[in-house]
Image: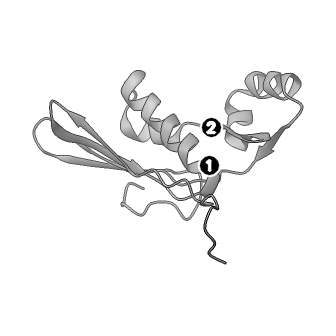
Amino acid sequence: QLLGGKRPRSSMSPTIVLKDGEPFLAIGCPGGSSIIGAVTNALLGRLVHELPLQTAVDLPRIISKNPSNAIEAPMCVQWPGVCEEFQQSYSNTYVSGPGTLVQAIEVSSDGEMLSAADTKRIDSGACGAI
């Protein structure tokens, strides 16, 4: 039911990143309350840590969703120590299956486009990356 004064359930955050005033990266995903954390995670991987686009999109995630924290199961497989420590430190933490499907397109300096799709779920690959 649509009512005034209510908060939207979705946290859509389609994002376009500019480099020298030109489009460099477009990224987004479905996923309700996990969208912001998933997109931010991939952006940090690509822009701050300079990971290849596909690697940044595929990074395991810890996403804080008030009042709990979700750790994607692949995180616990790749870095079990991080997963265990996080669960011990925060009692409201649970392990979840991969939820969101991050999709991204990057424009290289020569104008070539590179696509990446989150490979954690079998229904991923809308942009043909897998």
Horizontal and vertical percent position of residue 62: 67, 35
Residue at far bottom of view: 1
Q: Give the answer, above or below, for where 23 lies relative to 33.
A: above
Q: Residue 3 or 109: which is nearer the viewer?
A: 3
Of the residues shown, which amino acid type is indicated by label 2? Answer: Arg
Residue at image location 44% in from the left, 60% down from the top: 125
Q: Is residue 33 left or right of residue 24?
A: right
What secondary structure is found at the residue carrying circle 1?
helix
Q: Residue 84 or 68: which is nearer the viewer?
A: 68
Q: Give the answer, above or below, for where 6 lies relative to 88.
A: below
Horizontal and vertical percent position of residue 66: 75, 42
Tell me how the rendering is colored. Answer: one colour
> Which mark, by number, is residue 61?
2
> Which mark, by number, is residue 116?
none
Horizontal and vertical percent position of residue 55: 45, 36
Q: Residue 126 or 64: which is nearer the viewer?
A: 64
Q: Is residue 117 visible?
A: no
Label 1 close to label 2 by CB (< 8 Å): yes
Horizontal and vertical percent position of residue 81: 77, 21
What secondary structure is found at the residue carrying circle 2?
loop
Marks 1/2: CA–CA distance: 10 Å
> Which mark, by number, is residue 34?
1
